[in-house]
């Protein structure tokens, strides 16, 4: 789960990380009071959406007067912002954030992730922060520095020294940087983040360090013990199908292709997507209905993948281990009757009660392409999506 910049900054502020003061704006009428509260301009106004790349898309602007601020708010509130990270539909703009503009001398990059290779919380830092960080990583990877923290020892003074040195910070700035690292590490670990990013981390013209942007991603598996963060959820920013999936206990991720997949087990789902790709097709989603899938859950999953307008064929791949294939078949039939299916449907059932399951589908009178071999099933789905079946 993602937080907005203003919410992430509140977490940072609480942990002693220096961030600019700010005001949230939800309606044009809020602009006056926000400017008053923040004192003299210029100010910076920022669209709040769950995606980066806002600067390049016109979602961040320095404003110098009440009129300019109002016209920015008027131009964005109620619209959608499309950035390189949002996809073509963009994300709805319901909130803006206003801060006093900072005079920036240098833009640094600093983030925390869990490095899966070392299983450690890892700082990533660069002296070339700002809006072109992806290009820096691609073209001059030597300017990106990584440093892991041992989970038992925690953050140590040498971490701060090494990273400060890599970023060209000395003296009082290096000391302030150490405080910032401490705060970020605390937020990351205490709040169960899977990602925490400050880009840019500004060195101001006055020589201070200031987190000018903040991105926080919660590790959803820890949601049960982060109720304060869950309360900050902004559903409007989330994929409606992914939200619906969570309600039904389904693991669902929207993808770009046109072949919908319904599979039990994450590993099998990945393998199925790989096979589709190998056969020249593109999956429209990842969907794991889980090991103990019931007919109802299968029906819900089916409706979910069908609600995606770009789907042109469906591939159901179920291996009956714990789950019985005849139950899955019942779920498929229940769903197909409810939704008036017009798309080609390829089903591969294997494992416990596979024969009964296949028989149920065959007797249903529905046009279902039944396959027992997974490669053949993937091939059929790809051809069906291309309109060849
Ligand atoms: P992002 O593009 O979504 O990552 O949004 P950011 O919050 O990082 O803002 C984009 C860019 O706007 C930053 O890299 C800065 O160059 C610029 N920017 C943001 N805040 C300020 C500010 O207070 N003063 C100035 N001069 N520039 C800013
Ligand atoms: Mn940024």
Image (spheres, rainbow, N blue to C red):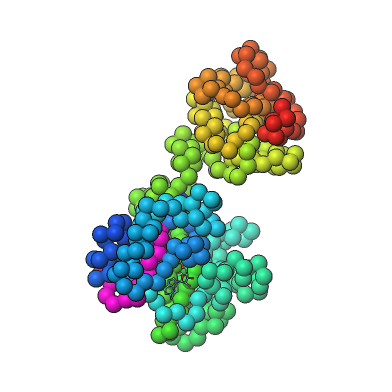
What residue is rendered at 74% in x and 41% in y? 280
Quadrant of the frame with the C terminus: top right
User: Does residue 246 sit above or below 70 in this rendering?
Assistant: above
Q: In which image quadrant can residue 32 be found?
A: bottom left
Horizontally, residue 183 falls left or right of residue 145, namely left
Q: In which image quadrant can residue 43 be found?
A: bottom left
Residue 314 coordinates in the image, percent (x, y): 63, 31
Q: 261 or 96, which lies in front?
A: 96
* Residue 64 visible in rendering: yes
Residue 89 coordinates in the image, percent (x, y): 50, 49
User: Does residue 50 sit above or below 336 in this rendering?
Assistant: below
Q: Is residue 363 magenta?
A: no
Horizontally, residue 18 falls left or right of residue 39, namely right
What residue is rendered at 38% in x and 66% in y? 45
Horizontally, residue 90 falls left or right of residue 119, namely left
* Residue 194 visible in rendering: no
Q: Tell me where the magenta segment starts and ends, as one range.
A: 37-48
What residue is rendered at 55% in x and 65% in y? 122
What residue is rendered at 34% in x and 59% in y? 74
Q: In which image quadrant can residue 61 be found?
A: bottom left
State how many labels appear: 0
Residue 278 coordinates in the image, percent (x, y): 74, 42
Q: 104 or 62, which lies in front?
A: 62
Q: Quick one: which residue is furthest to the bottom in this view?
A: 171
Residue 312 coordinates in the image, percent (x, y): 62, 33
């Amino acid at each position: 789960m993602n937080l907005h910049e203003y919410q992430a900054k509140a977490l940072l502020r609480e942990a002693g990380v220096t961030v600019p003061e700010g005001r949230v704006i939800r309606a044009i009428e809020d602009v006056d009071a926000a400017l008053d509260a923040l004192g003299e301009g210029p100010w910076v106004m920022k669209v709040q959406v769950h995606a980066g790349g806002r600067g390049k898309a016109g979602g961040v602007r320095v404003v110098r007067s009440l009129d300019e601020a109002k016209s920015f708010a008027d131009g964005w509130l109620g619209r959608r912002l499309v950035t390189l990270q949002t996809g073509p539909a963009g994300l709805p703009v319901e909130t803006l954030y206003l801060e006093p503009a900072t005079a920036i001398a240098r833009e640094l990059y600093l983030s925390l992730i869990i490095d899966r290779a070392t299983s450690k919380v890892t700082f990533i830092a660069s002296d070339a922060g700002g809006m072109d960080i992806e290009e820096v990583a691609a073209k001059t990877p030597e300017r990106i520095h990584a440093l892991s923290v041992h989970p038992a020892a925690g953050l140590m003074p040498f971490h701060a020294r090494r990273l400060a040195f890599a970023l060209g910070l000395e003296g009082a700035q290096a000391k302030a940087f150490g405080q910032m690292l401490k705060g970020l590490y605390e937020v990351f670990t205490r709040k169960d983040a899977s990602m925490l990013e400050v880009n840019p981390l500004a060195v101001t013209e006055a020589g201070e360090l200031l987190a000018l942007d903040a991105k926080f991603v919660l590790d959803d598996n820890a949601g049960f013990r982060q109720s304060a963060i869950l309360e900050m959820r902004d559903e409007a920013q989330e994929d409606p199908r992914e939200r619906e999936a969570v309600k039904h206990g389904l693991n669902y991720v929207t993808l770009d292709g046109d072949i919908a997949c319904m599979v039990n087990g994450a590993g099998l789902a990945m393998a199925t997507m790989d096979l589709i790709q190998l056969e020249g097709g593109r999956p429209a989603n990842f969907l794991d209905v889980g090991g103990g899938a019931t007919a109802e859950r299968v029906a819900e999953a089916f409706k979910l993948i069908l609600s995606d307008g770009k789907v042109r064929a469906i591939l159901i791949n179920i291996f009956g281990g714990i789950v019985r294939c005849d139950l899955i078949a019942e779920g498929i039939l229940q769903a197909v009757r409810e939704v008036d299916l017009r798309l080609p449907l390829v089903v591969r059932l294997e494992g416990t009660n596979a024969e009964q399951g296949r028989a149920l589908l065959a007797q249903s009178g529905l046009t279902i392409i039944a396959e027992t071999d997974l490669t053949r099933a993937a091939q059929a789905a790809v051809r069906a999506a291309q309109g060849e079946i």
